[in-house]
Amino acid sequence: MDNVLQMAAEHARAQEATAIHKITMRIGDMSGVSIDALTFAFDVLARDTMAAGAELLIEPVKARCRCKACAAEFTPDSPITTCPGCGAPGATLIEGREIELTSMEVS
Amino acid sequence: MSDSGALRTIVIKESVLDKNRTIARANRQWFDERRCLALNLLSSPGAGKTSLLERTLTDLADSRRMAVIVGDLATDNDARRLNDRGAAIVQINTLDICHLDADMVARACSTLTEVEPEVCFIENVGNMVCPASFDLGEHARVVLLSVTEGEDKPVKYPTLFRTADLVVITKCDIADAVGFDRDAAIRSVRAVCPEADVIEVSARTATGLNAWYDWIEKRRSHAGFGPSPVEHGTQE
């Protein structure tokens, strides 16, 4: 979360803004990031920054996989990405690992 | 800007890990230029990363110049265990951070310029969650799983195991005593990372260590760094 706030502050300063009011992030459900923990950390860490009191909006991103054997694309129902079509294990994650600072409202 | 002060939206769309990735790429180039194989060792606390490295540094001391970058929250206990084995040891104390990132490794590398290691082991902080997301600039990831941890660890921590190039099953000498189900463990590894190599070792009895040393040499060749200029067991 420190990284996010640093990035946000750099972008805000580059635009000569002095306050951040809202931050939107995209978080993949296989990114290893807990949205609850992220939100909690944000509220605490933002206090002494230009994002103090800002709203954090999280857009969750569902995982998508591509099977290495049959190339089928599917939404895995667990982090163990077994292909529902052919049963091959260890499919490649093509979406769901995002930890993205998407946009901000500043003034 | 003249509209300073007005409420406005900035579109960014940048990964929070972009900066880490950029530094990791530079690290990989640093290792490549020195023909040094960099291995990121990851596991839960107590799986035996330091014990494996103790043996490795001693056994390969005559054939390879080695370095270890050791990450820990606090203490230099692991670095002290690895000292005096002919390898350069760099300790990183991450304090409250639960993983190594590429910038910490870059700073550690800057102290290794005189050493010119041929193999650099990066012993990550013992943690199976956060370190998975951080590329350090390594050539390969080695994930350790000790026989005391339960055979289903790979399916419980798929985010980490999915990225493994090699899974090392450690403490094999006590596998029977703890009722370790080898087949179940390998099935669990295969379910998450079907392409990873699997090696079973005991750092205490030296079982399987040659397979580990061969794997390191194979990865050096794979990275284009060529075979050893020095035969095992001879002085340079």
Image: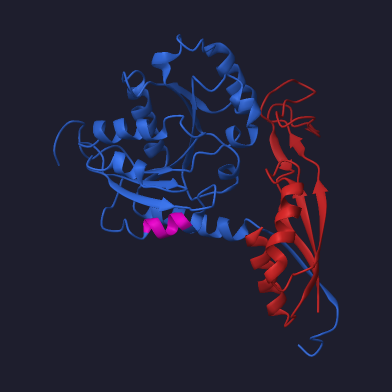
Please indicate, yes or no, whether residue B180 appears anywhere in the rendered image.
Answer: yes
Residue B184 as seen in the image, left or right of residue A14 = left
Colour scheme of this structure image?
A: by chain
| Residue located 42% across and 30% down the image | B48
Q: Name above or below for residue A52 compared with residue A100.
A: below
Residue B104 position in % (x across, y down): 46, 56
In which quadrant of the rendered image does the N terminus of chain A lie?
bottom right
Q: Quadrant of residue B37?
A: top left
Q: Does the magenta stretch include residue B107?
A: yes
Q: Name above or below for residue B19 compared with residue B164.
A: below
Residue B169 as seen in the image, left or right of residue B20 = left
Residue B114 as seen in the image, left or right of residue B222 = left
Residue A13 position in % (x across, y down): 69, 78
| Residue located 59% across and 44% down the image | B130
Q: Name above or below for residue B3 compared with residue A40.
A: below
Q: Is residue B179 magenta?
A: no
User: Magenta region: which residues?
Assistant: B104-109
| Residue located 32% across and 22% down the image | B204
Please indicate, yes or no, whether residue B119 appears anywhere in the rendered image.
Answer: no
Residue B93 position in % (x across, y down): 43, 52
Q: In which quarter of the image is residue B193?
A: top right
Q: In which quarter of the image is residue B131?
A: top right
Q: Pick whichever, A86 or B168, lies toward us.
A: B168
Chain appearing in red on the rendered image: A
Chain appearing in blue on the rendered image: B
| Residue located 74% across and 60% down the image | A43
